[in-house]
Image: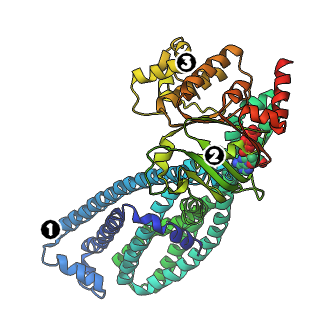
Amino acid sequence: MQEWKTIRIIFPLLKTHSWAIPIIIILGVLSSLAEGVGISLFIPLLQNFNRENSETDCGNILLCFINNLFISFSPNYRLFLIVLCIFGCILLKVSLAYSSSIIFSWYNSHIGHELRSKIFRQLLRINYSFLETQESGKLINLLATETWQTSKALTVFMNLIISICTISIFVILLLLISWQLTLLAGIVMTLISLAIQLMTRQVGSLGRQAVQVNEVLTNRMWEGLSGMKVIRAFGRENYEQKRFEQASEKVRSTFLKLDILSGAIAPVSEALSASLLLSILVIFLSQGSAGVPIFLTFIFVLYRLQPKVKELDGCRVGLVSLATSVQEVMYFLDSSDKPYIYSGDNPYNGLKQGIFLKAVNFHYHTQENFAIQDISICIPKGKTTALVGPSGAGKSTIIGLICRFYDVTDGDIYVDDRPLKSLNLTDWRNRIAIVSQDIYMFSTTVRDNIAYGRLDATDEEIITAAKLANADEFISQLPLGYQTKVGDRGIRLSGGQRQRIALARAIIRNPEILILDEATNALDSIAESLIQEAIATLSQDRTVIVIAHRFSTIEQADRIVVLEEGRVVEQGNLQFLLQLNGLFAKLYHLQYRTAKA
Ligand code: ATP
């Protein structure tokens, strides 16, 4: 059965807050028990009104047992006592059901929160190359929607157990009242259940489709928002509108079909159940064997059983329709088949000689070809090493490997004489600051964006860092100074201003190793000279690795590594490389001529 598949998948999740599960189930079952007892008390109540039959109808175990409970009381007092007991049972039932639902909600909210946190942790831990293969829309959908669906599946599962226990209690009660009528009801209800199962299968496949179309729509939303500028610049508003509407329409029609089909289950089951009740009534009237109070109680219990059976069917349908969501979440959380960057055990206390890449080969998860091949270079401590080369030569890949965003495929990277992999990853990354072309501004204040480099930085330290990065002047002119919001819903900053904030973020970190990915976009000469000045201050007595595009950087570098198609083709200082008259000299003269023109 499809629902068992979901149950098997969510089973590991039941380990969290496992103490709550039996409490929720026991409270749910006790509440049904209280209801069952309350209903049983209708037999003596009805008999009390029909006093001639009350003595003769004791041919039934349940009836005898209940009659014996009240036999010693006088008829008038007995009536009052039975009504009181029924009322007590109703009160007990609702209080137990309410307590169960409160713990249920608590459990549900915690599981949802923990799932979201686990997925986010996984996103932060998993190898970056794996994430690059996933669509952003899919990941957002996973985090925002599928986690809710999975916590819902857990609660549906518990409801299923409660329903099964409740139905068992009611069936026992029915058997005690009349096993013949129960047998008949059982056969018809099994047929109803089979009909429901057929519909459930359809719901399962629609549930899978619903997850897929939702992912496509989230992707459209994500791309529409993040690519808004490109869309407008290329006049693709109508094209994007059409694509969005198509995706939205698919979500609409799939969810409508899902709602129509899952909504049909309740009326179908109700109509079939009503015919069951009617057929039992006809059989009873044609035989005229049992007493009226017993028959009425049987019908009442059967009537109360209907919502429980419907709930059980609803739970089964729910589990089937949520199977794909649960599968997606559990697949993403499963660490056994995903690549990770593991931290080494050795503490890292600082660079003594330098970083050495030895015969390093690397290819990305999605690519068969090597992005870099047979790279052996030295990045000496306290010096500036420039990586130069045409686009796609492998410069950013080398930076990614040094920062351990990825691990090398072959060869090794050494920090002094120790393999990089053996070092504690947090220690290592804490000593590095990157100023990349692609500067990400969090949607918070300028102050917090700078403090991202070191979370415990004081306001004075932040202002000093901003001054060193030549950013203090423009920040002071912003509407709220350092408290001005930037990023998503805040003020827009120019490319040069963003770079200076990124520099201040790096300065506050006081990194031992500074990595600069120089911007290729032309900044105006004032902005460029301000940034150059700040970089010069920041680079003093530090190990700097720079993806160099500017002459000033290339000329000042102690060592230049020239890359082409993933291989080192030349390396040395500027004079040496110019004399060599190879690729570097060609690139250098080409840029120089372009700049002069
Ligand atoms: P640029 O100056 O244009 O940034 P680069 O010298 O930094 O280029 P890399 O970005 O390191 O070059 O790319 C080296 C090779 O690896 C290229 O062939 C590129 O297509 C490939 N590559 C880079 N990033 C990825 C990625 N995330 N997944 C797959 N392949 C990649």
Q: Can residue 307 be seen in this view?
A: no
Mark 2, mark 1: which one is toward the viewer?
2
Classify mark 3: helix, strand or loop.
Answer: loop
Q: Residue 515: where, in percent of width, then height?
A: 60, 36
531 relative to 15 in the view: left or right? right
**Residue at the (71%, 42%) spot, across then down:** 395
Q: Residue 499: where, in percent of width, then height?
A: 61, 25
Q: In this view, does 264 lie above or below 280?
A: above
The amino acid type, in three-letter code, at marker 2 is Cys
Q: Do the residues labelled 2 and 1 touch (CB within 8 Å)?
A: no
Query: Which label sits on residue 77?
Result: 1
Q: Residue 265: where, in percent of width, then height?
A: 59, 64
Which one is in front, 140 or 469? Answer: 469
Label 3 to label 1, Cα distance in Å?
A: 89 Å
Q: Residue 110: where, in percent of width, then height?
A: 40, 53
Mark 3, mark 2: which one is toward the viewer?
2
Mark 3, mark 1: which one is toward the viewer?
3
Whichever of labels 3 and 1 marks the residue nearer the N terminus, that label is: 1
Classify mark 2: helix, strand or loop.
Answer: strand
The amino acid type, in three-letter code, at marker 3 is Ala
Whichever of labels 2 and 1 marks the residue nearer the N terminus, that label is: 1
Label 2 to label 1, Cα distance in Å?
A: 99 Å
**Residue at the (23%, 82%) spot, across then down:** 65
Which one is in front, 434 or 351? Answer: 351
Task: Tell me which corner region of the image, top left, top right, bottom left or bottom right, holds residue 89.
Answer: bottom left
Dot 3 corresponds to which residue? 471
Q: How crowded is mark 2: few (under 14 residues within 10 Å), some or many (20 or more)?
A: some
572 relative to 338 in the view: left or right? right
The amino acid type, in three-letter code, at marker 1 is Tyr
Dot 2 corresponds to which residue? 378
